[in-house]
Image: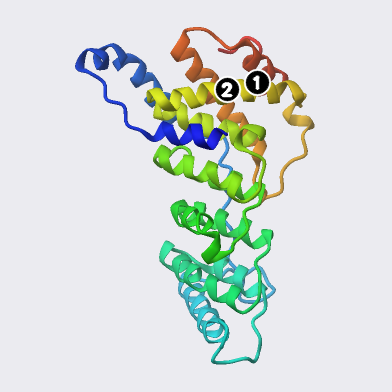
């Protein structure tokens, strides 16, 4: 399983001064490569709820006040023996709270209530889960989402494939490789296809491993690259102009795949000095690059 192999990538690798000097130029290139931003920002901030049905946005103060009001309403109505039983809590209030949250601290307050919803005999659906992980990325606290999904017994928040991809995306460039490997292991825990069986997920994890650039993470990356090439053979490239344009709050996997394959292609070239013709051919066929581009 890739998760078992991946965990070994978390071990630190130390380089001698001589090796460091030999690698200095390549490391500089790697730093430059992975410092490049994505061509298009896949995460579009979740719009806050409005005060009325008009298009008027809530001010930050009004947003916080509404968050506190909803939070105070829901708190005594949760658990096996709620203090208040009426009016009952509607499922939609959870989404409202997540959308209203403006900080990690507010999301943490929501997380603290999740177990009590389950104690009430209620369950969360995939739609809420996908909103939650997206909001965690928007508020730059993906490790909070990682904590929740890593403890299903406590929080019982289901992890769908779109949510899992979003979680990987939120972690793969700006967080330690250990966090990425933990997220990839959750695919098995939540009965999802393994990372190596999903093209977008495999590309994100490979990008993280190549960026880490340790001996063990490179082994994982090389294994995944082979899997990616097999998956690409089964998926015909589709020109960008012919793909359906993703809705505003979709996961936008095609954009993540485009960015990740670019990094993988260039990182492999930096490592070997040769272009991977299979990767380049698929990127050209998808319109990601022109035939004469490097």
Alpha-carbon span between mark 2 and mark 1: 6 Å
* Element assignment for label 2: helix
- Residue 71 position (above or below residue 247): below
Is there a contact, CB below 8 Å, between mark 2 and mark 1? yes
Q: Looking at the rendering, which quadrant does residue 17 occupy?
A: top left
Q: Is residue 238 left or right of residue 131?
A: right
Write the residue at 56% across / 47% down. Answer: 186
The residue identified by callout 2 is 225
Outermost residue on the top side: it is 274
Is residue 171 visible to the viewer in this orientation of the structure?
A: no
The residue identified by callout 1 is 229
Visual colour scheme: rainbow
Q: Nearer the viewer, residue 47 or 225?
A: 225
Quarter of the rendering occupied by the N terminus: top right
Outermost residue on the left side: it is 17
Q: Position of residue 99 (x, y in %)?
A: 57, 65
Is residue 212 visible to the viewer in this orientation of the structure?
A: yes
Q: Is residue 87 left or right of residue 272?
A: right
* Element assignment for label 1: helix
Q: Looking at the rendering, which quadrant does residue 103 occupy?
A: bottom left
Q: Estimate how packed mark 1 is, as few (under 14), some (14 to 19) or many (20 or more) residues with alpha carbons within 10 Å.
A: some
Q: Position of residue 230 (x, y in %)?
A: 68, 21
């Amino acid at each position: 399983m890739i998760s078992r192999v991946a965990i070994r990538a978390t071990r630190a690798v130390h380089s001698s001064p001589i090796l460091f000097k030999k690698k200095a130029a390549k490391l500089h290139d790697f730093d430059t490569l992975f410092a490049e931003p994505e061509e298009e920002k896949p995460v579009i901030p979740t719009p806050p709820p409005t005060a009325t049905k008009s298009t008027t946005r809530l001010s930050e103060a009004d947003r916080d006040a509404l968050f506190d009001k909803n939070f105070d309403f829901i708190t005594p109505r949760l658990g096996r023996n709620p203090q208040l039983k009426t009016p009952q809590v509607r499922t939609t209030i959870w989404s409202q709270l997540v959308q209203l949250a403006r900080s990690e601290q507010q999301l943490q307050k929501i997380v603290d209530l999740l177990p009590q919803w389950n104690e009430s005999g209620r369950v969360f659906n995939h739609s809420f889960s996908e909103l939650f992980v997206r909001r965690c990325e928007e508020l730059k606290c993906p490790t909070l989402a990682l904590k929740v999904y890593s403890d299903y017994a406590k929080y019982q928040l289901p992890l769908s494939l779109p949510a899992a991809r979003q979680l990987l995306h939120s972690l793969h460039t700006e967080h330690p490789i250990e966090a990425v490997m933990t997220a990839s292991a959750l695919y098995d825990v939540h009965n999802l296809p393994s990372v190596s069986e999903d093209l977008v997920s495999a590309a994100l994890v490979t990008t993280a491993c190549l960026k880490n650039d340790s001996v063990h993470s490179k082994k994982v990356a090389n294994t995944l690259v082979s899997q990616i090439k097999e998956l690409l053979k089964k998926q015909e490239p589709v020109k960008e102009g012919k793909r359906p344009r993703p809705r505003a709050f979709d996961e936008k996997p095609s954009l993540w795949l485009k960015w990740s394959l670019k990094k993988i292609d260039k990182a492999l070239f930096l490592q070997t000095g040769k272009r991977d013709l299979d990767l380049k051919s698929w990127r050209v066929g998808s319109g990601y690059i022109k035939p004469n581009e490097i």
